[in-house]
Image (spheres, rainbow, N blue to C red):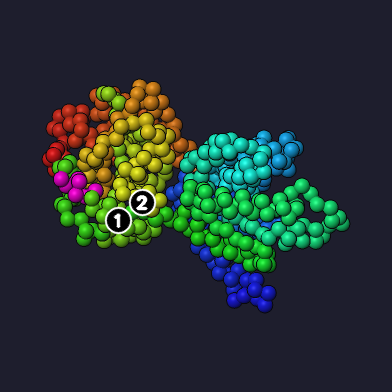
Amino acid sequence: MMSKDNSPGMEEIEELERRAELLKDMLEKRTAMRPLIIEFSGSPKAGKTRSISVIELFLKRNGIKTEVFTERASIAPIKQKGHLNFNLWVSCASLQGMLEALYRDIDVFILDRGIFDALVWNEWLEMTGKITKEEATQIAQFFTMERWTKLTDIVFVLTCDPIKSIEREYADQLTSKRGTIMSEHTLSQINQSTKKTIKKHSAKFNKIVSIDTTDMVAREGVTKIADEALKVLSAFLDESICVVPVSAVKVRLPEAGLVSDASTVLAFTETVNREKGFLPRSKAEQDPNVFQPIACAVLRYQDKVVILKRNKPGHPLHDKYDIWAGGHVSEGDNGPDILRTTLQRELSEEVFIKEAYDLSSQPIALIRTNEDARASRHIAVLYELTLKSEDVALALNQREFRSTRGTSMSGRLIDVKEIGNKYDEMGNWSRSIVDHLWPNETPSAEKKQPLFGHG
């Protein structure tokens, strides 16, 4: 119910609090390795600062650990606000703050001006002749790197009519003298730059929500922001993953073990691309009518292989050795070859390599376990990956890849002949891979064989 001034009443606020309360259980069980990142960008006096303050208090009061990184413009050692160096300093400071936040024990990180805002001011600097088109393009290329833009889960862009902005600026002041930014002409330019930035770069960001606050009362705007923030946080904590109906899979899958028959593997991957759907992970894990494809790869270099060990208490693979990297297929990976796209993302996130390898054109096997009903619904789609150089291979040796929220993963590059020493400490999928690729290296004299042939 809206109040008489069109601002939300207590019923709306109580509903938001109820939704926030539901998220607390999800936060305790979360699998995400980083906090949700929210950026606020906007024209002066559009309500950005107040919105951040209200949202921060709302999240904290509802048990969601939140941190705000305030804009660095006020403390910049560079005083010429219309200069390229000023914008770069402020923007890089925001990027630094965002990267540092990835490793802190928080649930939500709020950026008061971040990567998107850097692009807005970059447009304005070009528009006003302060930088060349070539410089603007080069700067935009840096700030729109996928490594940065995909970290920002939602951008709230608040805009306001220039006349209204000026009215708000001077409502409680004892002067009517205008600053360098608070003029109708400059404010119009900033709004234009914002529109251009959205048009040029919105596809590079996960989600952008534009809110014109010109005719809004304060609570109306922040309520809309809280609603969107809770939606994104819910999706972030319970990501949509790829599922395939069991009924759509026409090939015979093993109850447990590895199948490498090329026609079977190809048929399954084609079914994934043709029949794929997406469910929140919590629902997918409980649904007996769907399979969950997992894209993974063995990482090889000459006669060596990368072996990984995860430190993730409560996880089925905690403290076990594995010779594959990969993970669930997410909705964001959707495309004509979703499994390869997923694998490329996972390799970048898990072991920090991008394009420094040759990936088999088709997966080489499917793997399944029957430890329990939930595990049996996960079907590993295994690729073979060859690292391109010795430098890349050695960079993965004795490496701690990730350490945040009490979890980490370390890697070693070992000779294939050493695999048997770790066999008994491996997960079931890894044992199946060893049985298939290196049957002579299993520790038992009586070699274990895959349930299905080698293809």
Q: Residue at x 69, y 37 (%)?
A: 83
Magenta stretch holds residue 265: yes
On residue 334, the disc is 2
Q: Residue at x 52, y 64 (%)?
A: 19
The three-letter code of the residue at mark 1 reads: Lys
Question: Is residue 149 rendered to the left or right of residue 422?
Answer: right
Seen in the image, is 245 located left or right of residue 250?
A: right
- Nearer the observer, 83 or 295: 83
Magenta stretch, residue numbers: 263-269
Residue located farthest toward the right when viewing the structure as drawn: 174
The answer to whether residue 52 of the structure is visible from this angle is no
Q: Position of residue 445 (x, y in %)?
A: 15, 29
Identify the mark nearer the N-term, 1 or 2: 1
* Quadrant of res 302: top left
Question: Which SS class for mark 2?
Answer: loop
Label 1 and label 2: CA atoms lie apart by 9 Å
At which x and y percent is residue 28?
49, 53
Q: Residues within 10 Å of mark 2 (few under 14, many from 20)?
A: some
Q: Which residue is mark 1?
A: 276
Question: Which quarter of the rendering shows the C terminus?
Answer: top left
- Amino acid beneath label 2: Asn
Secondary element at image label 1: loop
Q: Tell me if I can see residue 381 in this picture.
A: yes
Q: Confirm or deny contact between disc 1 and disc 2 (CB under 8 A).
A: yes
Q: Main secondary structure of the magenta part?
A: helix
Residue located 20% across and 46% down the image: 266
